[in-house]
Image (spheres, rainbow, N blue to C red):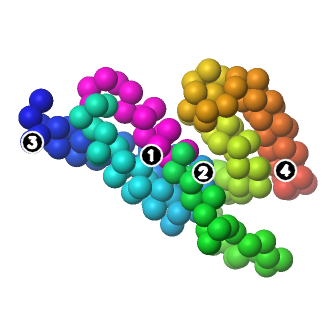
Amino acid sequence: MRRAEREAAFTDYVAARQVHLRRIAYAICGDWHRADDLLQISLTKLYVAWPRVCGKGTEDAYVRQIMVRANIDEHRRPWRREHVTDEVPELAAGADHQLEERSALFDALQELPAMQRKVVVLRHWLQLSVAESAKELGISEGTVKSHSSRGLAALEKALASSAPG
């Protein structure tokens, strides 16, 4: 495949999958600005590896793995660590009830420890198998199962306590 064809294939892939990949990045890190940065880093790394990845049908898995690893790398940097505060930022009120539910879910998801959040996103939102999730995160299948179980239990508890009535 010539360079022009590879670049056209990469551009087509990004155009078709960018919105979906941005949502995954948001689910992983919990902040739209950091999600944009994470997506940009991931797409840059994907572009470098594109000749090896293109046409194999593994592009999504490859970029998800890049996102997870890049997010882990960012958390290891001491200047990127978040500081807990007592003040909660105001959220814009929406008329759409479904939007409120999704917002509550994302808020509850962000309360999970990082690894539980990643496992829940990979297993239950992206519907990867236990083995696929373990491979992408570089952990054992048993660890995926325990993080998934604990994460879902914590989500249920958080959503039940925030439910009106």
- Circle 3 residue: 4
Q: Amino acid at mark 1?
A: Leu
- What element does badge 1 sit on? helix
Q: Position of residue 153 (x, y in %)?
A: 85, 38
Cα gap from disc 4 to disc 1, whole angstroms: 26 Å
Q: Residues within 10 Å of mark 4 (few under 14, many from 20)?
A: some
At x 70%, y 76%, the residue is 90
Q: Going 9% across and 35% down the picture, which residue do you hit?
A: 2
Q: Is residue 91 left or right of residue 160?
A: left
- Residue 60 or 94: which is nearer the viewer? 60
Q: Label for residue 158?
A: 4
Nearest to the eye among marks 4 and 3: give it.
3
The residue identified by callout 1 is 21
Mark with earlier residue (2, 3) = 3
- Labels 2 and 3 touching (C-beta < 8 A): no
Q: Quadrant of the image for the C terminus?
A: bottom right
Question: What is the magenta range?
Answer: 54-68
Q: In the image, what residue type sits under mark 3?
A: Ala
Give the Cα separation between the discs numbered 1 and 3.
24 Å
> Looking at the image, is mark 4 or mark 3 earlier in the sequence?
3
In contact (CB < 8 Å): disc 2 and disc 1: no
Q: Where residue 41 appears, x then y in whole percent?
A: 41, 55
Picture disc at residue 72: 2
Q: Where 18 falls versus 147 (above or below)?
A: below
